[in-house]
Structures are given as C-alpha cells and as structure tokens.
Amino acid sequence: MANGYDSNLALAVLIDADNTNPAIIEGLIAEVAMLGVSSVKRIYGDWTTPQLASWSFRSSRFSSSDTRPERMQQTAQ
C-alpha cells in the first residue's frame, strides 16, 4: 500500500467512447493499475458511426467487452 491504496482493490473502468478521446486510454489504464486491479473494463459507444473508427483497435485491446447499443431512430410524425 505504498501509494496509499489497497493494491487488491477491484475497480471497474467504464468509458463513454462517444465523448472521450481514444488517446487517453493507455494512460488511464496505467493510472488505474496504480490504484488497484481493473476487474471490469467496458467501452460504450455507437460503433456504427465513423466517429468511433479511431477506437476500434483500442477497444479490442483494452476492453473486456464493448457495448454496442442499438442506434435510436427517430420517427417522423
């Protein structure tokens, strides 16, 4: 517990890919590793949009599961 945290602390890392820059993920995971163990890693986003293309390789490398919600469709009234 040299850093003031229990190194066995189980942490969940949940990332909103629609609103987060993918360049931060390596530093984020390193920071979490100093605090404890990231037992759950999930990246949420609408993977059907071209805006998330830059997340594709990071998502598979750093996430234990990607969440791909159904794209909401507006109905004309």
Image (cartoon, grey):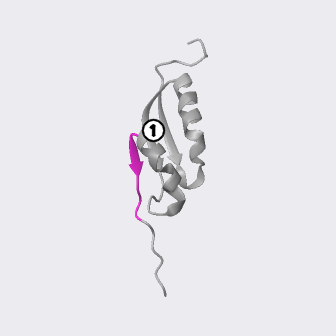
Q: Is residue 26 left or right of residue 57?
A: right
Residue 61 place in picture, x, y as percent: 43, 39
Mark 1: few, some, or many residues within 10 Å (few <14, many ≥20)?
A: some
Residue 34 place in picture, x, y as percent: 56, 23
- SS at circle 1: helix
Is 14 or 30 nearer to us in this picture? 30
Residue 63 place in picture, x, y as percent: 43, 41
Q: Give above or below for 47 relative to 75.
A: above
The count of marks equals: 1
Query: Image point 45% across, 74% down: which residue?
Result: 73
Q: Which amino acid, mark 1?
A: Phe
Q: Give above or below for 35 relative to 21.
A: above
Is 31 or 51 nearer to us in this picture? 51
Is 71 or 4 nearer to us in this picture? 71
In the displayed orientation, state which residue is furthest to the top: 2
Q: Quadrant of the N terminus?
A: top right
Query: Image point 57% across, 19% down: which residue?
Result: 5
Residue 44 forms part of the magenta stretch: no
Query: Image point 61% across, 16% down: which residue?
Result: 3
Q: Is residue 22 left or right of residue 66?
A: right
Q: Give above or below for 24 relative to 6.
A: below
Residue 48 place in picture, x, y as percent: 44, 63
- The residue tagged 1 is 62
Q: Give above or below for 71 relative to 59.
A: below
Q: Magenta span covers which residues?
A: 62-70
Query: Image point 47% across, 59% down: which residue?
Result: 46
